[in-house]
Amino acid sequence: MADTIRLKIKRQENAESQPYWEEFDVPYQKNMNVISALMEIQLNPVNAKGQKTTPVVWDCSCLEEVCGACTMIINKKARQACSALVDQLDKPIVLEPLTKFPVVCDLMVDRQIMFEYLKKVKAWIDVDGYYFAGPGPRVPEKVRRFAYDLSRCMTCGCCMEACPNVNDKSTFMGPAVIAQTRLFTLHPTGEANKEERLDAISGKGGVAECGNAQNCIQVCPKGLPLRRAIGEMNRLTFSHSLKKWLKAE
Amino acid sequence: MLGDNSYVLRKLHSLTGIIPLGLFIMEHFFINSFLLQGEEEFEGAVNFLHRIPYLWVLELLIAAAFVFHAGYGLYIVFTGKSNVGRYGYVRNWLFLFQRITAVVILVFLIVHVYTLRFSDLEITYAALSQALSSGFMVAILTLGVLATVFHLANGISTFLISWGITIGLRAQRFFGYASLFVFFVLLLVGINIIRLFG
């Protein structure tokens, strides 16, 4: 095994500046991941040509693939840097920032838009007061299991990165928010706001703009049941829109 | 109606692809296949079509559906950004082919309808056979048939997903293969028509 690992990183100083490539050789350690390789650069910011440079900027938090903060493009695939083990990757390891979100610096992007989308569909359960309202309605095990799988979304943005219909020319909000709308329309208390959520997800940028490329199903690191979530939202938005039109005064 | 019309437009786009456009393609292939029974039968079938009551209403409906489907479809084509280089999954390729064939069909149909519907050409076996005598025309027609048949077959399986009819993997896969079957059947029927004219 080579004692150094070559990293090829697409860097960018800020949101407006031009991206450029820089290569680094970092000392190999057993069981290292992309994050620990990036930490080596931080420790000794010298590029492969031996020139001193600025340390590469990236984002991370949990380091156990549940927060989504360290999502980047590793060897052309969007995934989390913390669970990308150096031993399992082709060399040189090519790192790029996500392309569907504005770059803050180097590999760090701003995924705020995903949270704005979640606000649009009210992806939460409203608290209807601070008094004790008794236990909530019971959820059948089958529903609970589906809801739990949907709740594993960490807003990492892999699904949006892989989606051909999410880009700067389109208004499509992407798969993650569709899955969360499904989750909160499934919830027995969340059902109170079902119509508002369905209005939002059948509006501009909603589920109807899905192009059925189904890349999201393939790339989701948490294996969310996106096929079923999108399929059921297709059905629910149609019956909702039809009923709404028929009932409107 | 819904505050914003994009939902209705998307659904209409999906629906018009099947009704009336998909049905029209099937009818078109069916009537042309009368050639199998001979020239006179073919001309009889064409004459029957020309004698349908309210034919102009049907033609107008199909034309309107086509203009809408193609117009809104072009908008969909231009708001997509294919990434098969990085994500080379089957459905992603189908997504790309659906958009490529859309543009091919649009160009082909403008020529096809202009030369055969809005020209002085009388629709007889002899005249069509004459028009189809060049290898170039055969190639153009074959390309047109290939693109149309793919777009329709794939459109059926994505229609079923977009309307929330096929939800699970098994159903989506089943109708994926069913679409492949439809593709080959329509392709054979289409190629056969071109062969019989040639």
Image (cartoon, coloured by chain):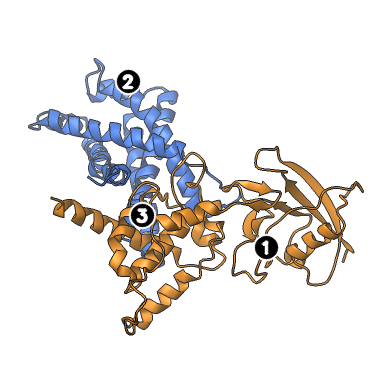
Chain colours: A orange, B blue
Amino acid at pointer 1: Cys
Res A196 label: none
Residues at badges 3 and 1 in contact (C-beta under 8 Å)? no
Query: Where is residue A27 drawn, in percent x and y?
Result: 88, 63
Question: Same chain for marks 3 and 1?
Answer: yes
- Residue B58 left/right relative to B106: left
Res A60 label: 1
Mark 1 nearby-residue class (10 Å; few <14, some 14–19, many ≥20): some
Q: Earlier in the sequence, mark 3 or mark 1?
A: 1
Camera-side residue: A106 or B177? Answer: A106
Camera-side residue: B168 or B180? Answer: B168
Residue on which the image places disc 3: A201
Amino acid at pointer 2: Gln
In this view, the mark in front (2 or 3): 3
Alpha carbon separation for disc pair 2 and 1: 70 Å
Identify the residue at image location x=62%, y=69%.
Answer: A65
Residue at the limit of the structure toward the right, as seen here:
A50
In this view, the mark in front (2 or 1): 1
Camera-side residue: A243 or A234? Answer: A243
Residues at badges 2 and 3 in contact (C-beta under 8 Å)? no
Alpha carbon separation for disc pair 3 and 1: 30 Å
Please determine whether, in this image, residue A182 is positioned above or below residue B134.
below
Please determine whether, in this image, residue B133 is positioned above or below residue A232.
above
Query: Where is residue A227 drawn, in percent x and y?
Result: 42, 63
Camera-side residue: A118 or A133? Answer: A133
Identify the residue at image location x=65%, y=42%.
Answer: A15
Amino acid at pointer 3: Ile
Alpha carbon separation for disc pair 2 and 3: 54 Å
Res B130 label: 2
